[in-house]
Image (cartoon, grey):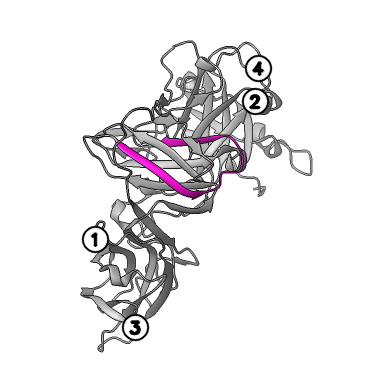
C-alpha cells in the first residue's frame, strides 16, 4: 500500500456526531448562525479594544461594497450578533467605517472541551490561540443590532460627582502548561481535558507574585482578593500570604481547581502587594500548586494615569451618575465611552482647562462595564480580513460520505492523484 503524508479527512454522513456543544438547554454544532446565502468577511482580532473596519479594508479584501448601506451590516462572534456603530447609515463611502468592541479569544470555545467547565484552570487564557474570529455580513432586514446612543446632557443641575469606581487589578499567569499527572511512576496523563488543565505558573511548592495597586479610595467598598489555582495529587495544606501575613489556610486532598475568595483590609493594598501561595503539608513534600489568575478588587479614584484607554466598572443604581475622569490622555479630539453591558455608546465632554472627561450615566439595574478610549491614539485594526463563502454540506445529505481535502492532496511527487484513486 502506498503511504503518503498528506492528510485526508473522510466525513461519514450517518455517523453519530461527537462534535456537538451543549449551551444551556441547546445542543449546537456551532454553525447555526450561518446564512449560506450570504457572503461573509472573516475578521481576526487578538486583543481587547475598540476596532475600526474601514470601507477601504473591506474593498481590498475582495468584495464590492459600493452599494451597501451602513444599516445593512451585521457582525457575529461566537454565534451571537455583536452590536456595532457605523459612521453612516447611508451608502458607505471611502472614508466610512464600522466600529465595535472586540475581545481576544479566551475560553469561549475551550470550555466545551471539558466535561465540567469548573475544570478549566485559566479562564483568561486559551489553550490554543489568542485570536478570535468575527464575521461581518450584510442584509436588508433593518433589524441589525446597533449600539444605543446615550445623550451626554450636562446642562442643569448635575448629581454629585462620583468619587470612586470598583477596580479589578488582574494578573494572568501563563508561563507554564499544566496537565494532571495521574500516575507518576508510569508517567500517565488522561487523554481527555482534565481538571486543572491549562496555562498557569509552574507547579511547585511556593509561588510568589507581585501585583500593583494605586489611587486607592479608602472610604469605598472593602477590597478582596481572588486566586485561582490547581494542585497535584496528595495532601495539601495551602497558605495564602499577603505582604508576609497569612490570610487564608486551606486543607485539601487530591487534584483541585478552584477560586479562593479572601477579604482584604485597606492596609493590605500597598503599591506593590506581595502575594505568596505555599504548600505546607508536612506529610507530603510534594504539596504543589499552580496559580493562573490573581484578581484584587478595590475602590479606586478616577485617575487613569494618562492612558489612552481604560476599562472600569460602575455599580448599578436607580439614579443617574455624574463622572469626571482625571489624568486621561487628552491628546486629540475623538473620545468615546462604551457601556458593554447595556450595549450603548456616548461621547464625553472635554474640559481641557481642568484636563478631565465629563459624562453622565442614566440609571441602570446592571453593573456597567465601561471602556473609554482616545480614538486618535488607540483605535485598533483587525490583524486580518478575508472574504469567505461558507459551504452548506447539507446539500450533500444523500451521499454516503464526503471527502474534505486540499488541492495539495490531489497529486503527489510521482503524479498520482490519491483522492481519485481512493
Q: Which residue shows up at 28% across the image and 34% down it?
A: 320
Q: Are marks 3 and 4 in contact (CB under 8 Å)?
A: no
Q: Earlier in the sequence, mark 3 or mark 2?
A: 2
Q: Is residue 118 left or right of residue 95?
A: left
Q: Which residue is mark 3?
A: 286
- The dot on residue 93 is 4
Q: Earlier in the sequence, mark 4 or mark 2?
A: 2
Q: Which residue is mark 1?
A: 222
Which-is-in-front pick, marks 3 and 1? Answer: 1
Q: Which residue shows up at 44% across the image and 42% down it?
A: 371
Q: Earlier in the sequence, mark 3 or mark 4?
A: 4
Instruction: Give percent across and percent down for residue 416.
Output: 74, 38
User: Distance of mark 2 from mark 1, alpha carbons?
Assistant: 48 Å
Which-is-in-front pick, marks 4 and 2? Answer: 4
Q: Which residue is mark 2?
A: 58
Q: Which residue shows up at 43% across the image and 19% down it?
A: 144
Q: Are marks 3 and 2 in contact (CB under 8 Å)?
A: no
SS of the residue at dot 4?
A: loop
15 relative to 121, above or below: above
SS of the residue at dot 2?
A: helix
Instruction: Give percent across and percent down for residue 351.
Output: 50, 39
User: Distance of mark 3 from mark 4, alpha carbons?
Assistant: 64 Å
What's the magenta region? 321-339
Which-is-in-front pick, marks 3 and 2? Answer: 2
Q: Is residue 234 visible?
A: no
User: Distance of mark 4 from mark 2, alpha carbons?
Assistant: 11 Å
SS of the residue at dot 1?
A: loop
Amino acid at each position: 500500500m502506498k503511504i503518503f503524508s498528506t492528510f485526508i479527512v473522510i466525513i461519514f454522513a450517518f455517523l453519530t456526531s461527537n462534535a456537538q456543544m451543549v449551551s444551556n438547554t441547546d445542543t449546537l454544532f456551532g454553525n447555526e448562525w450561518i446564512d449560506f446565502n450570504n457572503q461573509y468577511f472573516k475578521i481576526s482580532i487578538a486583543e481587547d479594544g475598540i476596532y475600526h473596519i474601514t470601507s477601504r479594508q473591506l474593498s481590498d479584501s475582495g468584495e464590492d461594497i459600493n452599494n451597501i448601506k451602513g444599516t445593512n451590516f451585521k457582525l457575529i462572534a461566537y454565534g451571537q450578533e455583536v452590536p456595532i456603530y457605523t459612521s453612516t447609515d447611508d451608502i458607505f463611502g471611502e472614508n466610512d467605517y464600522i466600529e465595535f468592541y472586540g475581545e481576544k479569544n479566551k475560553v469561549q470555545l475551550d470550555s466545551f472541551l471539558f466535561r465540567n467547565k469548573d475544570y478549566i484552570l485559566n479562564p483568561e487564557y486559551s489553550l490554543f490561540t489568542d485570536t478570535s474570529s468575527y464575521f461581518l455580513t450584510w442584509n436588508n432586514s433593518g433589524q441589525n443590532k446597533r449600539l444605543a446612543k446615550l445623550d451626554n446632557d450636562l446642562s442643569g443641575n448635575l448629581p454629585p460627582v462620583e468619587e470612586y469606581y470598583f477596580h479589578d487589578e488582574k494578573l494572568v499567569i501563563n508561563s507554564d502548561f499544566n496537565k494532571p499527572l495521574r500516575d507518576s511512576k508510569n508517567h500517565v496523563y488522561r487523554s481527555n481535558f482534565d481538571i486543572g488543565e491549562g496555562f498557569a505558573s509552574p507547579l511547585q511548592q511556593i509561588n510568589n507574585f507581585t501585583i500593583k495597586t494605586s489611587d486607592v479610595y479608602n472610604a469605598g467598598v472593602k477590597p478582596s482578593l481572588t486566586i485561582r489555582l490547581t494542585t497535584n495529587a496528595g495532601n495539601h495544606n495551602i497558605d495564602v500570604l499577603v505582604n508576609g501575613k497569612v490570610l487564608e489556610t486551606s486543607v485539601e486532598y487530591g487534584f483541585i481547581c478552584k477560586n479562593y475568595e479572601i477579604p482584604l483590609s485597606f492596609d493590605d493594598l500597598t503599591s506593590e502587594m506581595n502575594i505568596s501561595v505555599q504548600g505546607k503539608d508536612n506529610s507530603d513534600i510534594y504539596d504543589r500548586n499552580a496559580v493562573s489568575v490573581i484578581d484584587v478588587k478595590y475602590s479606586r479614584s478616577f485617575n487613569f494615569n494618562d492612558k489612552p484607554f481604560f476599562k472600569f466598572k460602575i455599580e448599578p443604581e436607580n439614579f443617574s451618575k455624574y463622572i469626571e475622569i482625571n489624568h486621561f490622555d487628552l491628546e486629540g479630539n475623538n473620545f468615546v465611552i462604551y457601556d458593554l453591558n447595556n450595549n450603548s455608546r456616548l461621547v464625553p465632554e472635554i474640559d481641557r482647562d481642568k484636563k478631565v472627561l465629563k459624562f453622565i450615566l442614566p440609571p441602570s439595574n446592571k453593573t456597567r462595564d465601561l471602556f473609554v478610549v482616545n480614538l486618535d491614539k488607540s483605535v485598533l485594526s483587525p490583524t486580518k480580513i478575508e472574504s469567505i463563502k461558507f459551504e452548506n454540506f447539507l446539500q450533500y445529505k444523500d451521499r454516503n460520505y464526503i471527502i474534505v481535502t486540499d488541492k495539495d492532496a490531489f497529486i503527489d511527487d510521482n503524479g498520482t492523484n490519491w483522492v481519485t484513486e481512493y
